Image (tube, grey):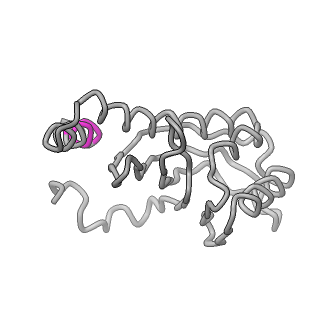
Amino acid sequence: MKRRDLCGAAIAGAALMAGGTATGAETQASKADKILNAWVDAWNREDLDAMFALFTPDAHWVNIVGMHWQGRDAVETAHRVYFEIMFRGVKQKLIATESIMPLPEGGAVVVARLAVDAFRQPNGLVKPPSEDRLTLVMVPRGNDLAIVHGANVAIVAEAQQHDPMAGKPEM
């Protein structure tokens, strides 16, 4: 069974134990997955208005090189600047949703693996195509979820062979 299937089963089981329904738990996971897919779709269409409609006003973002932007306006402004100077035409592909972990009150933490096209960095160097690990923390907003925190981490291929947990069962 895949990790995502296990997470879904755990969410459903937790909802049933709490007196809820499996449908409600599945809805939480499907809402989180919907936001993740909407993020990737908006990025690929270069629709920054749609991207940042997914965020709460107090959202934070930590980018791939460790910059920490606080508040949706700052997160959006920084992304708009970078779309103008290096991300125009750069596509992302969702490789896998690695986990959707439920949070109290109906929120979720999503971890996904993305493939990102090559792009020219502000220093003029071309960053080759890569894989990133994206974490999104989501909170309820009406009947949906909204992103309150995001962090994007480069997957360093050379380091993966030294992962002490690679191939081991989850704890």
Front in this rendered view, residue 11 or 68: 11
The residue at 76%/43% (across/down) is 48
Q: Quadrant of the N terminus?
A: top left
User: Residue 91's spot in the image, x, y percent?
Assistant: 67, 39
The residue at 48%/55% (across/down) is 137
User: Residue 31's spot in the image, x, y percent?
Assistant: 45, 35
Q: Is residue 20 above or below residue 168?
A: above
Q: Is residue 90 above or below residue 127?
A: above
Judged by its main secondary structure, the magenta piece is helix
Q: Quadrant of the C terminus?
A: bottom left
Q: Is residue 141 above or below residue 170?
A: above
User: Residue 117's spot in the image, x, y percent?
Assistant: 65, 44
User: Residue 134's spot in the image, x, y percent?
Assistant: 50, 53
The image quarter in which residue 163 lies? bottom left
Q: Is residue 28 left or right of residue 128?
A: left
Q: Which segment did they paint magenta?
A: 4-9
**Mark count:** 0
Q: Is residue 155 left or right of residue 167?
A: right
Front in this rendered view, residue 76 or 19: 19
Q: Is residue 138 left or right of residue 88?
A: left
The image quarter in which residue 89 lies? top right
The residue at 52%/53% (across/down) is 132
Front in this rendered view, residue 13 or 79: 13
Q: Is residue 6 left or right of residue 69?
A: left
Return the residue found at the far top. 23
Front in this rendered view, residue 68 or 22: 22
The residue at 68%/40% (across/down) is 43
The image quarter in which residue 126 lies? bottom right
